Image (spheres, rainbow, N blue to C red):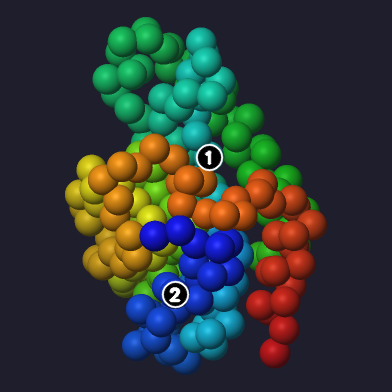
Amino acid sequence: MIFTDRFEAGELLAQQLKGYANDPDTIVVALPRGGVPVAHVIAKRLGLPLDIFFVKKIPSPYNPEAAIGAVSENGMEYLNERAVMMLNVSRPYIDEQIQKIMEGIREKRALYQKPRIPVVGKRVILVDDGVATGASMYLAAKALKEEGAKEVIIAVPVAPPDSLALLKEAADRVVVLDVPVDFMAVGQFYRDFHQLSDEEVMELLQDTSQP
């Protein structure tokens, strides 16, 4: 399945999630930035509030593009213990990176002018534009459960088969439109997969907050 863009993917996911429409105990939470357009459509179609939740990768000291783990904005961490051991990554390095990441997350949250919606006792529909390894989505689901969400539903347009098991460990329900066996990267399943700007994200968040 090839999606025209993230908005089309959101429309298709909204159809799968229509049973939650206008539910006062349900909120839609996007992983920024790519998850925001998908979640924006879902929130609008279902009449639900939209929030964002930051999860950032902890980079390898030898290759900043490679992740040795991730950290969520409420301070929960996920480490690939095998990678940490193989690369002999020190705990002080990890702590230093987490501190930098948390500072960056606080700056983004302030820039987007989006105070968090409390998740205690709520059903959270957790959205991204796709899943590769699943580590970020896994951590996000675990972190929101830790905060008191009564249920977490992961909703993504595309994910590889081997990531589904990880997602199902963390979520109460997983909704995926396409599970291709020839998965290489999320972007291969979109005609338009441009990098979103902060301005685009802020515009979508503001639009969803309108009555």
Classify mark 1: helix, strand or loop: strand
Q: Residue at horizontal 28%, vertical 64%? A: 174
Q: Residue at horizontal 50%, vertical 34%? A: 57
Q: Where 67 sits versus 105, above or below?
A: above
Estimate the x, y position of residue 196 in percent, counting from the top left: 69, 51
Estimate the x, y position of residue 52 in percent, counting from the top left: 57, 61
Q: Where 51 sits versus 83, above or below?
A: below
Residues at marks 2 and 1 touching, judged by CB atoms closer than 8 Å = no
Q: Which disc is residue 12 wearing?
A: 2
Give 101 or 158, whichever is nearer the viewer: 158
Q: Where 140 sits versus 205, above or below?
A: above
- Tell me: 149 left or right of 167: right
Give 125 or 77, whichever is nearer the viewer: 125
Estimate the x, y position of residue 206 in percent, counting from the top left: 74, 72
**Residue type marked 1:** Lys
The disc, 2 or 1, on the residue closer to the chain's N-terminal end is: 2
**Residue type marked 2:** Leu
Quadrant for the C terminus in the image: bottom right
Quadrant for the N terminus in the image: bottom left
Q: Residue at horizontal 39%, vertical 42%? A: 132
Q: Which disc is residue 178 wearing?
A: none
At label 1, counting other C-alpha atoms closer than 10 Å, the crowd grade (few under 14, some 14-19, many 20 or more) is many
Residue marked by disc 1: 56
Estimate the x, y position of residue 126 in percent, counting from the top left: 43, 64
Please identify, in this view, whether the residue under mark 2 or under mark 1 is nearer the observer.
Answer: 2
Give 125 or 18, whichever is nearer the viewer: 18
